[in-house]
Amino acid sequence: MKNNIKLSFITATYNDEKFFDGWIKDLVKQTIFHECEIVFVDCNSKENESRLIQPWIEKYPNNIRLFNLSYDKGLYNAWNIALQNCRGKYITNASMDDRRSSQFAEKLTKFLDENEDIDVVYTENYTTSGPNETFENNSSNGNVYSAAEFSFQSILTSNPPHVMPMWRVAIHDKVADFLESYPSCSDYEFWLRCAFMGIKFKKYDERLGLYYHNPKGLSTNPENDSWKLLDENYVRNSYTELFLTNTHRGYITNEYFFNWWESRDWRTHKKDFPRE
């Protein structure tokens, strides 16, 4: 069968049963879902979300694929496994508690199709404290999870792509995959790595997502701040130091960057994951 997949949604699940129904319905309603795939990684979840997705695989056998892990090594390990199995030209992460416009996939893939010089596109998103709402019917009241226009200054002080960016799968050939040593901020380190290696970012001027500020989320639960903030600060401070000590260069070679990158201690966090 000819592969007509343009966009891969990558999803890691661990005890997310309460979000599953809204999540799957949100993705299959995408206007170009026939050109999309869901790469679904079950991280040995106690709630066995694999059983929930089986009927949807039967309905969309060319558009949904399941990978069951016998261990949980964290979000970014699951993302990397998903990346290794993507068939799309473009990728976006699909967290199970977030929602998006039915035109999300169509509009952002079209943007990347028409702008070959851009590698990563992202939007601002509405934000809500209510679980399982939809993009069309939610309690955000216009509140927005803001995202700055890309610059080195903005990415060193925040994480503009953050919630649901879309990017070209080809960038991984240049910048590699996500670090697996951080529980919640490896996407931030990845986007910083991309920025310093010349990957091009663009903010799309339309809000296409709904971000659920989950009080029990890995990155949003205050109980995780003791290790999460240490991780984030180490990543931010490392790249800020690189930026400040090389502003006179104007351009950093790949060799220079990776020598620096490999010299860093990217395993400062205190939360470990079980191994096989």
Image (spheres, helix red, strand yellow):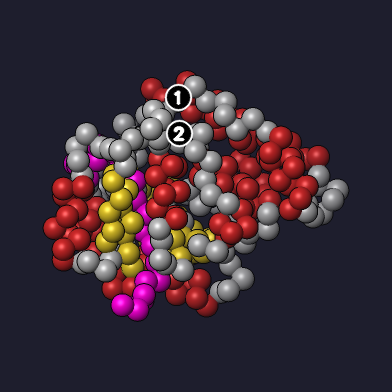
Q: CA distance from mark 1 to mark 2?
A: 7 Å
Q: Which residue is mark 1?
A: 271
Q: Which mark is residue 183?
A: 2
Q: Nearer the viewer, residue 106 or 137?
A: 106
Where in the figure is residue 131, as x and y percent of width and height? 24, 42
Position of residue 40 relative to residue 264, above or below, is below
Where in the figure is residue 21, as x and y percent of width and height? 17, 51
Position of residue 229 relative to residue 74, above or below, is above
Task: Look at label 1 and name its amino acid.
Answer: Lys
Tell which circle, 1 or 2, labels the residue nearer the N-terminal end.
Answer: 2
In the displayed orientation, state which residue is furthest to the right.
Answer: 248
Q: Nearer the viewer, residue 68 or 10?
A: 68
Task: Look at label 2 and name its amino acid.
Answer: Pro
Secondary structure under the numbered disc 2 in the rendered image: loop
Q: On the picture, is 248 further left or further right than 19? A: right
Residue drawn at the location 32% of the way across and 64% of the way down = 37
Q: Which residues are magenta?
A: 1-19
Total numbered circles: 2
